[in-house]
Every structure is written in structure tokens, then in C-alpha cells.
Image (cartoon, rainbow, N blue to C red):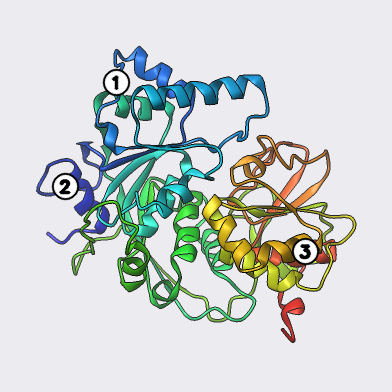
């Protein structure tokens, strides 16, 4: 019987010839992404294990509350470093490297055809590499460390076909926000989303990453991109080992199929306090903002900084706005600096943060005051997401974030791109 990408990868990971949606399987991941907490170590030891199973599969990144903002966090980070050294974990990335998902992918750990499991809900990001990448909680990751495999339910597959070309001033972030607004935050709960179509084939790896990163905002268990020349070029000289891409069989069964045409789409924005509360920017333009955030694993790469820099070149940030820019990784920071984007942001009045998760989740940077409004290029805007349930967060493309920082209010970036 014809199979989807997820069904093929999960069958291989479970050592089975085939699997069906709804079936419970015992699956062994090819790699485990751990944005690690000391709790993982504690839970693993409570399960009677002192040594992680399959250490060569484990990738650890210290990216939350980094650098440490308190003695408690500093002690946790130290415990992780000591554990990594004691157990000789080969793939350990400390606070200087950046956000786990970006660091994981740019270092060639995410490969086509893999089953990736990891801690953090946005582990769906690695599906950009034609993989099944599943998010788990602390206890499940501890179990993976202790046992090496985990039971899971095979998700139903959903196909999202996206056609059309994006107009000037409209970006991949606008497209995925539009899709989330239509599908809703519960529209793909525990489903495997396969993206396809003319737009998808033209997207860069960075833009595909933004799509799969936000698949979880539709409730999805994973989001998967097709393998093509773009994927192949990205992995050249980067892949840690050989890989085998996976494509759906002709006639594969999908529970639901969505069709989108983005050729007439304008800039979109997600309004407080849910990601699927999506509207055209034009409908909320003029609403005052106090802080703008450019960064996160969703849109903190060099090309995102480039989108913002085109808006900010020769302009100043509104005096009533704080613009925070946090690169997704040290490598992306270096690339944005090499291309002159960092200088442009600094000259406009932005503050450049260290690579990491701090401002996105409200951990140790950019926390909002009561009643303040932030426009962010990140992935979530529920109450308290940036550290204060008494504040409001809007989500938009890096260009819309930059335009709003200049105007002091939510603004359509196309007006500032004219003549450039």
C-alpha cells in the first residue's frame, strides 16, 4: 500500500515493513536533540541508568537562560558541562553557539530520512531536512537516554500544498502565518504535515525552516519538507554521515489536503494572544509598539537580518521603541556581520543580543513591562510568552518588525521598501 513520508520513516525506525496511522510502535531515533535541562539527568538516573544509551546519537545544546542569569542557572549549566565531559558526549554545544534547532541543523545533525527526537516543542524545525522530527518532554527524553527507544503513536498525515510566488515585501513568514490562521492552532493536532507545491520548491532552506518550525503552531507532531537540489546543496560538506531521502509514494493517503495560493498575499500579522489570530497587517497598522524583537529559531538567521537591514538602512528606530536583535547562532551572527547587516542595525539604534533563546521565551532578556506591546519575528504570542502576562505580543516577518520599529507602530514594510 502507498505510504507517506512519515509512515516510511517510522516503519524503518520501528524495524517494521509498514505502519498504519494510529498504530503504537516502539521507535529508535537516529539522533536525539537535547536542549538539555539538569532534570533530564535526574530523571534518567531515577530510571536506573547512569550512562546514556547510544551516546553518539546525542546532541546537547545549552541555549535557554544563556548566559546564566542566576546562581541556580549557572549551577545547572555547570552540571551539564561536567556530565558531558564525564560521559564523553561528542556533540556538546555550550552557550556561545546559539539556539539548539539552528545549531543542530547547521552542524549537519539533521539529515533526510532520519527519525529525530528531542526536547522542545519546536523540534519540528528539523523536518526542513526531509526528516521526521518529533518533540518530547523532559521525561521522554530521559527515557530515550536510559533505554534508547520510545513508544509512540503513528500520526495521520496531512498534505499542505502551497503555490504562487510571493510579491515584493511579502515573505515566507507571512505565508506560514496565513496558513496557520486558516488551518487554526488545532487543525493538525498530532498530525504529520507534508509541505509541497511551487512556492515550497522555491524557498531557501532558511525559509523552509521557518515553515517547519511553526508546524507545531497548528498542533502538528512533525512538519516535513521534500528533498530536492536546495536540500542537497545545503548538506554538501555539512552532513555528518550518508543519508537516504524519502518521498511519498504515488497515491499515498492523507487524512486532509489543503491548497493555498499566495500570489496575492500581503504582509500578515498574528495578534494577541494566539498564533492563529492572524490578520493582514493593514488591518492593525498604526497600533503602537514599545519593543520590537528580531530573532529566535524561527527568524534569526542572516537572511532575516538582511530583510530588516533593507528597511533600516539610513533610518533610525523610533525613539519610543527598543529594537532587540538576537542571532539564531554564532555562525549566523558572523554571516550577518560579514554582510554588513549588524552594522546597519546598530546604526539604526538596535541592540544586538547574544545568540540564544532569552528574549523569545522571556527567560533573561527583553522582558516586557505591564501594558507594553512587542512585535516579534518569533513563533509564539500567548500571554506571558516574553516574560509578562500583562503585555501583548504580535508576530510578523522580520521586515514588518523592522518597519514597525521605525514607525513606532505596526507598519506595512512595503511602504518603506519603495524606491529601494
Q: Mark 1: which secondary structure?
A: loop
Query: Label 2 vs label 1: CA separation?
Result: 26 Å
Along the viewing direction, whichever of 46 and 265 lies nearer the viewer: 46
- The residue identified by callout 2 is 12
Q: Mark 3: which secondary structure?
A: helix
- The residue identified by callout 3 is 404
Residue 300 visible to an observer of this rendering: no
Q: Earlier in the sequence, mark 1 or mark 3?
A: 1
Along the viewing direction, whichever of 75 and 337 lies nearer the viewer: 337
Q: Where is residue 39 drawn, in percent x and y?
A: 47, 21
Residue 403, quarter of the rendered image: bottom right
Labels 1 & 3 near each other (Cβ < 8 A): no
Q: Residues within 10 Å of mark 1 (few under 14, many from 20)?
A: some
**Residue drawn at 42 percent across, 47 percent down:** 104
Residue 353 visible to an observer of this rendering: yes
Residue 259, quarter of the rendered image: bottom left
**Residue drawn at 24 percent across, 47 percent down:** 21
Determine which of the numbered discs, if any, sits on residue 33 in the image. Answer: none
Q: Where is residue 331 drawn, in percent x and y?
A: 52, 55
Q: Is residue 336 above or below residue 49?
A: below
Q: Is residue 68 above or below residue 241?
A: above
Q: Earlier in the sequence, mark 2 or mark 1?
A: 2
Labels 2 & 1 near each other (Cβ < 8 A): no
Image-based side of 237 in relation to 34, left or right: left
Q: How many marks?
A: 3
Image-based side of 235 in relation to 210, left or right: left
Residue 357, quarter of the rendered image: top right
- The residue identified by callout 1 is 51
Q: Where is residue 382 drawn, in percent x and y?
A: 64, 43
Q: Mark 2: which secondary structure?
A: helix
Screen quadrant of the C terminus: bottom right
Amino acid at each position: 500500500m502507498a505510504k507517506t513520508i512519515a509512515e516510511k520513516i517510522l516503519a524503518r525506525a520501528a524495524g517494521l515493513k509498514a505502519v498504519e496511522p494510529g498504530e503504537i510502535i516502539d521507535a529508535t531515533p537516529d539522533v536525539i536533540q537535547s536542549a538539555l535541562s539538569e532534570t533530564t539527568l535526574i530523571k534518567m538516573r531515577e530510571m536506573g541508568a547512569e550512562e546514556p544509551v547510544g551516546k553518539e546519537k546525542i546532541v546537547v545544546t545549552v541555549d535557554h537562560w544563556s548566559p546564566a542569569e542566576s546562581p541556580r542557572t549557572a549551577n545547572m549549566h555547570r552540571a551539564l558541562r561536567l556530565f558531558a565531559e564525564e560521559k564523553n558526549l561528542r556533540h556538546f554545544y555550550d552557550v556561545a553557539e546559539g539556539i539548539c534547532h539552528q545549531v543542530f541543523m547547521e552542524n549537519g545533525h539533521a539529515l533526510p530520512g532520519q527519525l529525530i527526537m528531542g526536547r522542545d516543542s519546536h523540534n519540528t524545525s528539523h523536518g526542513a531536512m526531509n526528516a521526521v522530527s518529533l518533540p518530547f518532554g523532559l521525561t521522554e527524553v530521559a527515557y530515550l537516554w536510559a533505554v534508547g527507544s520510545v513508544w509512540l503513536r503513528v500520526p495521520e498525515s496531512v498534505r499542505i500544498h502551497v503555490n504562487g510566488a510571493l510579491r515584493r515585501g511579502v515573505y515566507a513568514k507571512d505565508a506560514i502565518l496565513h496558513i496557520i490562521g486558516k488551518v487554526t492552532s488545532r487543525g493538525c493536532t498530532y498530525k504529520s504535515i507534508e509541505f509541497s507545491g511551487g512556492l515550497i520548491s522555491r524557498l531557501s532552506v532558511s525559509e523552509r525552516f521557518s515553515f517547519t518550525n511553526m508546524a507545531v503552531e497548528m498542533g502538528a507532531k512533525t512538519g516535513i519538507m521534500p528533498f530536492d537540489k536546495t536540500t542537497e546543496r545545503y548538506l554538501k560538506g555539512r552532513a555528518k554521515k550518508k543519508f537516504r531521502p524519502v518521498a511519498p509514494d504515488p497515491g499515498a493517503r492523507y487524512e486532509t489536503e489543503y491548497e493555498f495560493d499566495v500570489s496575492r498575499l500581503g504582509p500578515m500579522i498574528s495578534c494577541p494572544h494566539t498564533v492563529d489570530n492572524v490578520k493582514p497587517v493593514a488591518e492593525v497598522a498604526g497600533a503602537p509598539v514599545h519593543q520590537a524583537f528580531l530573532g529566535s529559531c524561527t527568524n534569526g538567521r542572516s537572511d532575516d537580518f538582511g530583510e530588516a537591514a533593507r528597511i533600516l538602512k539610513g533610518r533610525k528606530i523610533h525613539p519610543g521603541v527598543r529594537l532587540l536583535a538576537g542571532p539564531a547562532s554564532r555562525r549566523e551572527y558572523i554571516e550577518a556581520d560579514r554582510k554588513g547587516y549588524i552594522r546597519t542595525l546598530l546604526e539604526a539604534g538596535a541592540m544586538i543580543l547574544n545568540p540564544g533563546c532569552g528574549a523569545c521565551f522571556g527567560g533573561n532578556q527583553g522582558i516586557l513591562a505591564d501594558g507594553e506591546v512587542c512585535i516579534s519575528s518569533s513563533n509564539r504570542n500567548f500571554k506571558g510568552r516574553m516574560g509578562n502576562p500583562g503585555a501583548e505580543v504580535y508576530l510578523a516577518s522580520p521586515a514588518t518588525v523592522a518597519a514597525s520599529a521605525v514607525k513606532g507602530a505596526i507598519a506595512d514594510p512595503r511602504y518603506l521598501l519603495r524606491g529601494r
